[in-house]
Amino acid sequence: MDLRQLRHFMAVAETLHFGHAAQRLGMTQPPLSQSIMALERELGADLFLRSKRSVMLTDFGRQWLDHVRPAVEAVDDLGPIAERLRTGKAGRLSLAFVSTADYSVLPDLVQHYSSSFPDVELDLIEATSDVQIEALLEGRINAGILISERSALPSALDYRPLLTEPLVAAVPESWCRGGALDLVDGELQGDAWMAQPLIIFPRRVSPDFHALVTGFYHTQGFQPMIRQEAIQMQTIISLVSAGLGMALVPASLRHLARTGVRYIAIAGDAPMLETGLAWRKGDEAPILAGLIDIAAKAGGDG
């Protein structure tokens, strides 16, 4: 059987009249009758009860119609679906993100993209920058929100900045009450606080973030006393809450409220952290183009 025969069957089933069905299909009645009879021979069962005065669906025909109709409608939808896929209005987009983005650029970016492309299925994957870069190069994700200097990325990837923000100190609340920190107008003053134990991302996971923090210590003449490393920002803040040490984190992480943790601005020139969107060069997927366009509007033309 072919799609043409299924359309013939549906037309007769819906009109229960071979003449009217033939007129709807733009054909004469004899070829339509031959098509239905050929279909019945192939199926091994009658689809219609015919008399000189009426045409009726058999019980088999009525049940089979319930399966034929959605199948034909699905085929009819293939053209519009293809057009939506071609223009990026439908499909599936895989977007990875570092944990810090969950408190800064990710919510707005996802909200704007989903509003603009409601029929695109968005797969969100939390992953560290090193994992994202590998996944991008292997084609396992479409794009990634990560922390990396543009110059440090592989040449096969393109990049657009989304956000630049200062680092702030996440410290145990008990340190503030106990006078362990020199605070003036709610800011960390001087450099004595750099002697406190530090909790930080491992270098292998986010080399640029790690270098930003440790480099800041070195410019102030300090060697950071790294107490603990952790790959998730939520874990780092939990360790701060437990009093194991302090951490330098993006200012947007203030949105992550945690009992026993206080976020304090660093006086003077605090380190600045850039978060950006990366994707494979030459990737012309329409769904990706839509994301890049929205990212450009959110983060400027970078």
Image: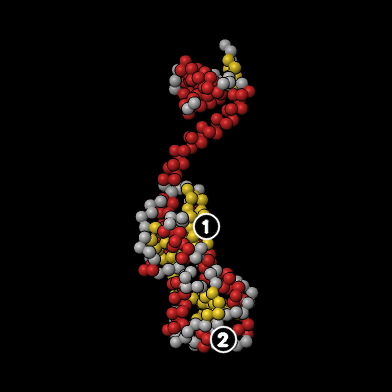
Q: Earlier in the sequence, mark 1 or mark 2?
A: 1
Report whether 302 appears left or right of 131. Answer: left
Tag 2: amino acid? Leu
163 sits left or right of 59 in the view: left
Foreground residue, 24 or 223?
A: 223
Q: Position of residue 256 (x, y in %)?
A: 58, 70
| Residue in the picture at 44% in, 85% down | 220
Of the pair 276 and 105, the residue shown nearer to us: 276
Identify the secondary structure beneath mark 2: loop
Q: Which residue is mark 2?
A: 181
The answer to whether 20 is drawn above or below residue 280 in the figure is above
Is 297 situated left or right of 98 in this image? Answer: left
* Residue at point 49%, 82% (across, down): 224
Q: Which mark is residue 106?
A: none
> Which corner quadrant of the image does residue 259 belong to?
bottom right
Could you tell me residue 134's position as x and y percent?
A: 44, 61
Q: Coloured how? A: secondary structure
Figure disc tally: 2
Q: Marks 1/2: CA distance?
A: 39 Å
Check disc 2: other Cα within 10 Å, few if <14, some if 14-19, many if 20+.
some
The residue depicted at 54 percent of the width and 74 percent of the height is 229
Q: Nearer the viewer, residue 234 or 259?
A: 234
Image mark for residue 124: 1
